[in-house]
Image (cartoon, rainbow, N blue to C red):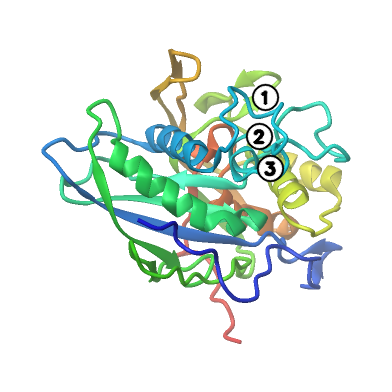
Amino acid sequence: MPVPGMITGKQSFGGRANSFGSVDGFPREVHLPLARYRFRFKGSGAEHPQGYLGSAWRGAFGRALRNIVCVTHLDACSPCLLYRSCPYPYIFETPPAPGAQKMRKYTAAPHPFLLEAPAESEKADAHHVGLTLIGRGNAYLAYCIHAFERAGQQGLGRGRARLLLEGVWQAGTAEADAWELIYRPGETLNARPPGVPSVPPAPAWARLRFVTPLRLQRDGLLVRPEMFRFSDLFSALLRRISMLTYFHTEAQHETGFAELVKQAHQIECAVVDLSWKDWTRYSSRQKTTMQMGGLVGAVAAPLEGASPLWPYLWLGQWVHAGKGTSMGLGQYRIETASLPKMKSA
């Protein structure tokens, strides 16, 4: 089966930020283009994957992508001549560029992708997994599709359940829940360019519901339910969005981080309904099980007088927060019932 064609037409994966206006000197929107894709598979046998499969999909996706694109077959990527131009290290290892002014002490920047797998097992005859590509990561969509197709054929989970790709859908806009078919195996790929999620007016209150375990750290320790502070979430989110913008777009995202974090420290959640959800995953690289539990539940935060924080909170629904985001952890949703209606254009 042929590799799907690259995205066609004029593409923009993150030029300099447009002028969206500002609130107290801070942007109304954060210029981080992204696109959301959904893969639908059909089970090909009696076995079918069980439980939350974010980690399993990440591992299968990575192995398949490396097998597809690697031409030197070295044990490690970093000594390879193609290290800075190959899709696999950019997507999965994401080394900072030699001249990068940020994260110079780190070996990896935030990856330009994340997965969203169903929280519960699906029926044997259907399986879905979501892929979000950020900024320049969208240039590699065709490779990702081929890798997911190969991963499904090779089998997923402990039972190596074989899955056949039926099609790929893309959200009509970055934040929409309407999906359009863009690819079927053997046909032409017809994807839209990535876009920046539209930000509604800031509400007086925001209720955040954590869908997958949220792993936050403070002073080197995991934040437990009784320890949670709004600033723990916002600081991690601000840092993540800043790094994604810096490494995966051409936008210059320099804003008053210290002032934003200061505002976040002043917010006290009126409702904190959190619990700890244990989750164990097996690391094929480290040959051992790993504990990846985190916070689930909901919090309600007052935002009156803190509207500069709102664009980051809103965007965080699609880029996730905390540790383990590439396998789908740290996903949250903002309840829309209390939000002001957006003015029509």
Q: Quadrant of residue 134?
A: bottom right
Horizontal relation, residue 28 to residue 289: left or right: right
Q: 104 and 30: which one is in front? A: 104
The answer to whether residue 143 of the structure is visible from this angle is yes
The residue sitting at 38% across, 33% down in the picture is 56
Quick one: which residue is furthest to the front in this view? 72
- Which tag is nearer the camera, tag 2 or tag 3? 3
Task: Check disc 3 and report the residue beneath it.
Answer: 240
On the image, the x and y values in percent for residue 197 come to: 60, 66
Q: For label 1, count other residues whose C-alpha is less than 10 Å away and answer few (under 14), some (14-19) or many (20+).
A: few
Horizontal relation, residue 157 to residue 221: left or right: left
Task: Check disc 1 and report the residue beneath it.
Answer: 218
The residue sitting at 36% across, 49% down in the picture is 149
Are dots 2 and 1 in contact, CB under 8 Å? yes
The residue sitting at 39% across, 25% down in the picture is 279
- Which tag is nearer the camera, tag 3 or tag 1? 3
Task: Check disc 2 and report the residue beneath it.
Answer: 232
Residue type for callout 2 = Asp
Secondary structure state at the residue bearing disc 3: helix
